[in-house]
Amino acid sequence: MTGGSPSPVGRWPSVPPGGRLVAIAPDLMDRGRISSARPDVVFLGGPAELAGLGPDDVALVDLGRPAVLEAVGTCPAHVVGFVAHVDGARSAAAVTAGVDEVLPRSVFFRRLAAPAGSTGPDGGDGPPSGGR
C-alpha cells in the first residue's frame, strides 16, 4: 500500500472515524486525480487486498479492472466503483456483485474533486446507487 494522510473533513466520500480510504486504480491518470483530490488515500496492490479491509474502510475501485468484481464479495468495506458510462453490463454486474455505489467515471471524478460540503446530483451528496 502507498499513500495516506489525515482525512479531509467534509469531503466525499466520507470515511468513518478509524476507517481508511483505499483505492484500486492501476491507471496512472486515475491515480493522480484520486490522490490530488484525496491525499489521504492509500492505493492497494490489487483486488485480493479488498478482503483485508474493515467495515469502517471505504474502497474506491475501477470496475473495469480484472478480478475486481469477484473480490468485492469478500470485502466488508463500503465500496464505491466507477465505470465507463457506456458499460451498462459492467454496471449491472457491479450492483449484483455487491458494490455499494456504482458511478459513471465522469460523476465519480466530479464528486471526488468537488469542494467540501458540495451538494447536488454530482457534488457528492446525491443518492447512492448500488447493491448492498
Image: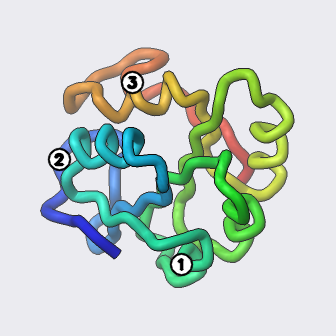
Instruction: Identify the coloring.
Output: rainbow
Find residue 71 and report its horizontal and vertical position in percent: 69, 70
Q: Is residue 63 above or below residue 50?
A: above
Q: Is residue 89 left or right of residue 102?
A: right
Q: Are marks 3 and 1 in contact (CB under 8 Å)?
A: no
Residue furthest toward the bottom? 52
The Cα–Cα distance between marks 1 and 2, rounded to whole angstroms, is: 26 Å
Q: Which quadrant of the structure image shows residue 72?
A: bottom right
Q: Residue at position x 65%, y 29% from top?
A: 84
Q: Residue 110, labelled with which disc?
A: 3
Q: What distance separates the C-alpha of mark 2 from that of mark 3?
A: 18 Å
Residue 9's tag is 2
User: Above or below — where is 94 with respect to 33?
Assistant: below
The reply, left or right, for residue 28 in relation to residue 40 is right
Q: Is residue 118 left or right of residue 49?
A: left
Return the residue at label 1: 49
Dots 1, 2 in contact, CB < 8 A: no
Relative horizontal placement of residue 18, taking residue 24 as reference (left or right): left
Disc 3 marks which amino acid? Arg
Secondary structure beneath label 2:
loop
Q: Amino acid at mark 1?
A: Glu
Q: Nearer the viewer, residue 28 or 116?
A: 28
Nearer to us of marks 1 and 2 is 1
